[in-house]
């Protein structure tokens, strides 16, 4: 970046920042003294933010009325109480016509009738499970994109809303607590009676015996879901092994092949969403391009239901995924912009430091994390067969960058029995007993999309638009996701913790040699540290999870390594003699200051 352009950018940051803050009506959110969050200007209206929070995508976790009246384990307080959901990191929303039960962001009613012939669970193999007792509710509670991709950042009693930012939620603990609450409701007569009365009223409009059977059946289903995705080491806040969960739901649950199970032990941070639709590839391992396919796969991993047995004529590939809603969410994301550093909240950017940091960035970082040119354009791919161009990304293999390889390796090397998906595989894969789990994911998603196209009658151009303009080129070499994505870093200040697995707490630590980084820190606080650019790392009474790169015996925790992104052009620059040397501490702070300016 040229010095003149940086000076203009800094002047804009200094002069425009106050105008980019917009207060919201009080919402009882994390809010201090009842105040709601302050929105940064990201290209959305408040109505568009609300639509993103409330648009259901076909996720069906638990019958809606059950969730509304379910109590916490060990307590008579409701599971959905703001205090319980706060402790898990979910963001409160105000009560409204669209949200009468004060559910947190990303928790929504799906009142589309459930597909009655979809048995979504491996639980049918478990003792005590009766398939006919699976609840056939017409109102379900599901999760939306916003539950994992909306952030609140607090500083000195001000709360900032970051749409599309990584959420500080502990999704794994949420599921564990939910299944524990359901188990206790099954086993505790008084708790069940309060649950039954809440659902049906004192008159007992529901058959008590039937309700108890359905609750028992679905509790077994949920316990099995928790068990098959639970790893040896908890994920904590702001991370999830989404790929592991999606593949288990397809290859184990939907295919009904328990031998396909693999522990979901490669948690990654929730990626930020701004500019994602403009990238040539997304996901941490740069494995997905087609927007509709990516989103259908995501729904199937967050409690969407899928039927894989039978044939297309008898309902194969029926799914609860709401593809047209997913397309609308993609349209919203297309207009989402990176948040600008709010100087009126965090303090002014030091122009001198940022200018020096810009030079260091151009010398060492720009090759992997591109910047806009003087016209405001990123490096782009050549036009594809549909004439569409995308922001060009690249990837680095774990051997090149040195970061934890677990996520890449699980995707590359996981093999599964294909079952009824075998006919939908490439011909050279159909003779194999086990195939890439990624291929099975692709086949299942393709089947869901084809069924949607056939049922809706949409033409190829309409489907291409839903895919975000991505069209495969038969002459191009296949994209093999062997590494981690390198993408633009605009808005990076709002996305801690860092590295793909959330193992580095702030930007300053990212610029230290790997051996000097913190081996453990607390994650869960939303209180911002504007100097180091991350969140506070001390134990918090609000939410605290101790992230550890090493176990008590000193052995590395699989999936949690904070090594890598260290050495030449990562934490080193060339000195006057032409040899690489570590950044000086002043240079690190210059780079941190510059990274604040990217938007």
Image (cartoon, grey):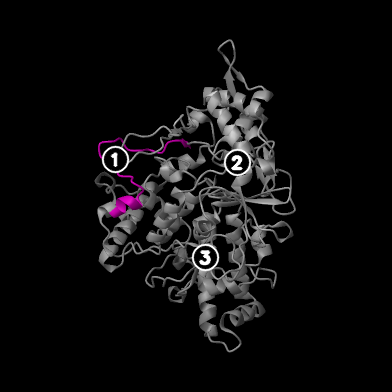
Depth order, front residue of 111/561: 111
The residue carrying mark 1 is 387
Secondary structure under the numbered disc 2 in the rendered image: helix
Residue at image point 36% right, 54% down: 445
- x and y, in percent, of residue 283 in the image: 46, 44
**How many marks are shown on the rendered structure?**
3
Separation of disc 2 and disc 1 at Cα?
36 Å
Task: State which region is magenta.
Answer: 462-486
Which numbered mark, 2 or 1, is in the foreground of this view?
2
Residue at image point 49% right, 48% down: 336
The residue carrying mark 3 is 108
Give the main secondary structure, helix, strand or loop, of the magenta stretch.
loop
Above or below, 14 relative to 323: above
Q: Would you say residue 470 sits in the magenta stretch? A: yes
Secondary structure under the numbered disc 3 in the rendered image: strand
Which numbered mark, 1 or 3, is in the foreground of this view?
1
- Label 1 crowding class (10 Å Cα cut-off): few <14, some 14-19, many 20+? few
Q: Residue 16 bears which disc, if any?
A: 2
Which numbered mark, 3 or 2, is in the foreground of this view?
2
Residue at image point 47% right, 74% down: 135
Q: Would you say residue 424 sits in the magenta stretch? A: no
Q: Quadrant of the C terminus?
A: top right
- x and y, in percent, of residue 485 in the image: 46, 37
- Label 3 crowding class (10 Å Cα cut-off): few <14, some 14-19, many 20+? many
Separation of disc 1 and disc 3 at Cα?
37 Å
């Amino acid at each position: 970046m040229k010095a003149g352009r940086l000076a203009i950018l800094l002047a804009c940051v200094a002069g425009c920042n106050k105008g980019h803050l917009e207060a919201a009506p009080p919402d009882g959110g994390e809010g201090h003294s009842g105040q709601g969050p302050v929105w940064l200007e990201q290209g959305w209206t408040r109505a568009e933010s609300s639509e993103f929070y409330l648009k259901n995508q076909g996720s069906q976790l638990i019958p809606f009325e059950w969730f509304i009246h379910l109590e916490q384990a060990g307590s008579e307080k409701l599971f959905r109480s703001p205090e319980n959901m706060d402790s898990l990191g979910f963001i409160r929303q105000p009560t409204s016509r669209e949200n009468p039960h004060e559910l947190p962001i990303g928790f929504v009613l799906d009142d589309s009738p459930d597909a009655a012939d979809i048995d979504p669970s491996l639980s049918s193999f478990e003792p005590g499970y009766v398939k006919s007792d699976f609840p056939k509710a017409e109102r379900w509670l599901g999760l939306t994109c916003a539950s994992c991709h909306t952030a609140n950042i607090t500083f000195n009693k001000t709360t900032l809303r970051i749409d599309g930012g990584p959420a500080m939620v502990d999704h794994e603990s949420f599921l564990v607590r939910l299944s524990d609450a359901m188990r206790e409701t099954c086993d505790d007569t008084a708790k069940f009676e309060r649950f039954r009365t809440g659902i049906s009223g004192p008159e007992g409009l529901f058959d008590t015996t039937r309700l108890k059977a359905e609750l028992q059946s679905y509790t077994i289903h949920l316990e099995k879901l928790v068990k098959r995705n639970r790893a040896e080491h908890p994920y904590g806040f702001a991370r999830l092994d989404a790929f592991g969960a999606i593949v288990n739901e397809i290859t184990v649950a939907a295919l009904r092949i328990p031998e396909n199970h693999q522990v979901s032990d490669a948690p990654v941070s929730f990626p930020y969403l701004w500019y994602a639709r403009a990238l040539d590839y997304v996901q941490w391992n740069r494995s997905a391009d087609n927007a509709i396919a990516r989103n259908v796969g995501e729904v199937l991993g967050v409690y969407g239901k899928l039927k894989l047995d039978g044939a297309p004529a008898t309902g194969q590939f029926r799914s609860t995924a709401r593809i047209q809603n997913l397309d609308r969410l993609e349209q919203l994301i297309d207009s989402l912009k990176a948040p600008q550093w709010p100087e009126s909240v965090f303090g002014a950017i030091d122009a001198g430091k940022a200018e020096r940091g810009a030079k260091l960035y151009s010398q060492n970082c720009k090759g992997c994390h591109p910047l806009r040119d003087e016209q405001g354009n990123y490096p782009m791919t050549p036009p594809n067969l549909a004439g569409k161009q995308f922001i060009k990304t690249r990837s680095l293999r774990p051997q090149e960058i040195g970061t934890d390889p677990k996520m890449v390796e699980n995707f590359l090397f996981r093999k599964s029995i294909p079952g009824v998906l075998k006919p939908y595989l490439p011909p050279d894969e159909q003779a194999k007993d086990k195939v890439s789990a990624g291929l099975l994911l692709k086949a299942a998603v393709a089947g869901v999309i084809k069924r949607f196209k056939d049922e809706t009658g949409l033409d190829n151009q309409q489907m291409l638009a839903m895919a975000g303009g991505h069209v495969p080129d038969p002459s191009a070499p296949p994209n093999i996701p062997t590494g981690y994505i390198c993408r633009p870093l605009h808005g990076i200040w709002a996305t801690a913790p860092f590295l793909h697995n959330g193992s580095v707490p702030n930007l300053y630590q990212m610029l230290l040699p790997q051996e000097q980084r913190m081996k453990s820190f607390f994650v869960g606080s939303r209180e911002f540290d504007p100097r180091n650019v991350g969140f506070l790392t001390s134990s918090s009474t609000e939410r605290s999870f101790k992230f550890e790169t090493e176990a008590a015996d000193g052995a590395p925790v699989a999936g949690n390594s904070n090594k890598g992104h260290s050495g030449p052009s990562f934490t080193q620059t060339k000195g006057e003699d032409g040899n690489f040397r570590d950044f000086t501490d002043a240079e690190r702070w210059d780079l941190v200051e510059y990274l604040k300016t990217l938007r």
